[in-house]
Image (spheres, rainbow, N blue to C red):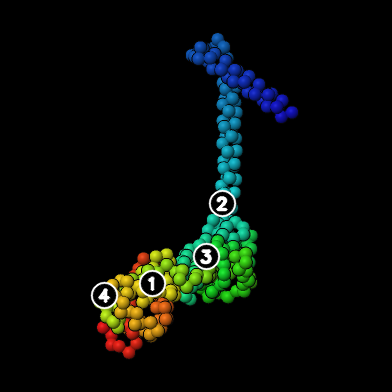
Amino acid sequence: MIILNDSINNDTENKLDDRAKSCLEYLEQNAGVVDKHSVDSDNIFLASYLYLKGSKKVEKLTRRLYLLTIAIAIFTIVLIGLAIYEIPDYPIWGQSVTPISSQTYIDRGTDLVHDTEYLIQISNFKPAYDIKLELLTDVKGFYNIYDSRGYKFKNYVNSSNRTVLIYNDDEINPVLLHIIYVERILKPEQPSIVFRPLPPNSNDSFYLFIRNTDYDIKYARKTYELTDDANLFFHTTMYDSWKNQSFIIYENNVPIEKGTISSDGKAIIDVRDLNKGECKTYLIKKMNTSII
């Protein structure tokens, strides 16, 4: 039915166009001729025809302006909605989790620790306030879980499947979630710390160069072959006398720790606050001797 009406309208418009063309041709051919043919009817027809054509153009323009107005109104409503719900800064629904800092280091002697902070943004349009995270590495235990700004919430952790569930009852948004956990427990001899004796040295003391290779260190512990390593480096056997002896460790001429060398010449050396690639020097000195 719609196709039929369009066909009739097009046919009528074509006939009007033909009639207008005929009138124009006649008027052009008989310009200035008097009493040969009355042109009033042609002039009236052409005036009406031009009015009709102008009306159709105005109608098309009005329709386009109307559609444009509707499109602008819809677009404005969408922008207002995006601003109200803070999209795209916040997700449309659910949550977005973005790691914003991460550090791996050795602590508590033999713990390989991951210290990671997450920015968790919750949808304002369709929120889900409880937060569930699955950590990327194995988990042997957790040091701490907290919001960096001091907000309080309850949490449930499961080391076996590496999950952290936060009960966000106060609907905190966003959450700056700080998670510190242990990936694995290193064996005492496993931390990658390089020890090397250095001169000046004597029967009572020597310097020990320390460098780590794999991780930052807050606190690491290593069993060190003190007697054998010192004898080998200095081409001597005098450090055999250090077995079963106590010693003091100095850093920057300040005593920081004491220990005892076992009967087989081994000693436990603790290292603190050493970033990956950095180095430091300890002075290892027998007890009850003066510092060099």
Q: Which residue is mark 2?
A: 76
**Closer-to-camera residue (231/199):** 231
Are the residues flagged by discs 1 and 4 in contact, CB closer than 8 Å?
A: no
What is the crowding at mark 3: few (fewer than 14 residues within 10 Å), some, or many (at least 20)?
some
Question: SS of the residue at dot 1?
Answer: strand
Across and down, in percent, residue 243 comes to 38, 82
Tally of numbered discs:
4
**Closer-to-camera residue (46/37):** 46
Counting residues from the start of the chain, the first of labels 2 and 1 encountered is 2
Q: Which residue is mark 4?
A: 199
Q: Which residue is mark 3?
A: 118
Q: Residue at x 54, y 17 (%)?
A: 24
Say which amino acid is labelled 2. Thr
Say which amino acid is labelled 3. Tyr
Counting residues from the start of the chain, the first of labels 3 and 2 encountered is 2
Q: Which residue is mark 1?
A: 274
What distance separates the C-alpha of mark 3 from that of mark 2?
34 Å
Across and down, in percent, residue 143 comes to 54, 74
Q: Residue at x 71, y 29 (%)?
A: 2
Counting residues from the start of the chain, the first of labels 1 and 3 encountered is 3
Which is in the foreground here, disc 3 or disc 2? 3
Residue 218 visible in this rendered orientation of the protein: no
